[in-house]
Each structure stands twice: as C-alpha cells, then as structure tokens.
Image: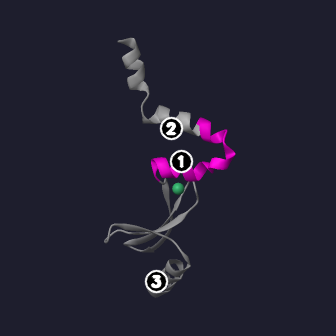
Amino acid sequence: MKTQTALERFNAQMLKQALSWIIERSPRLGKPDIMCRIFGHDYKLKRKITPYLREIECKNCKREFGMHDELRCILPLDDELRSCNDDLVKLHGS
Ligand SMILES: [Zn+2]
C-alpha cells in the first residue's frame, strides 16, 4: 500500500520538478520552450489594448500573444498584429 501512496504522490508538481531537473542539465533542449510545450504558457498581462483585447507575454519563454476576450482566442503576436494593436491604442486613446 505504501508504494501506491508514494506513486500517487508523484503528481503533476513532482513531474514538473523532475522534468525541470532534467532540462536544466540538458542545455540544448531549450528550457523555457520545452516547459511551455509540456505545461502550456504562463501568461502575464503586458499591455491592454481595448477592454476586450490584451497583449500578454509568457513568463517562461517570453513569447508574446494577443488575447481577444470576445472571440476567446490567443494569437502569436507578430509584427502585423502588433502594429494593428498600436493603431487600436491610438484610436481608443489611453
Ligand atoms: Zn511560454
């Protein structure tokens, strides 16, 4: 029974720790990127464009995204989207 409990405790958090241990020792894997691919991005707000549109950034891999609340979608923030957002900011004022 004890072995089972120990196995049960090997939950997502433990797995994450184990993986980051491995990744830290394998520089070629590209640490932030692989963590994001496995666990998803860890977003933080970067810039508010409109009440429903925001620019967000991943704390791990530093990739930027545009997040649209009404459409419920997240798009990679490329130059085109960024300049589009810049125009929207100008339109809406601050
Ligand atoms: Zn990320």
Left or right, 79 with respect to 8, comes to right
- How far across and down, in percent of the image, does residue 30 sit? 63, 51
For the residue labelled by badge 3, is the local secondary structure a helix, a strand or a loop?
Answer: helix
Q: Earlier in the sequence, mark 1 or mark 2?
A: 2
Q: CA distance from mark 3 to mark 1?
A: 33 Å
Q: Verify CB contact (< 8 Å) between mark 1 and mark 2.
A: yes
Residue under label 2: 16
Against 2, residue 61 (above or below) is: below
The boundaries of the magenta stretch are 21-40
Q: Quadrant of residue 53?
A: bottom left
- How far across and down, in percent of the image, does residue 59 sit? 55, 54
Residue at the image position 49 percent from the left and 83 percent from the top:
84
Residue 88 got which mark? 3
Q: Residue furthest top?
A: 1
Mark 1 CB near ligand 1 (8 Å cut): yes
Task: Say which of marks 2 and 3 sits in front.
Answer: 2
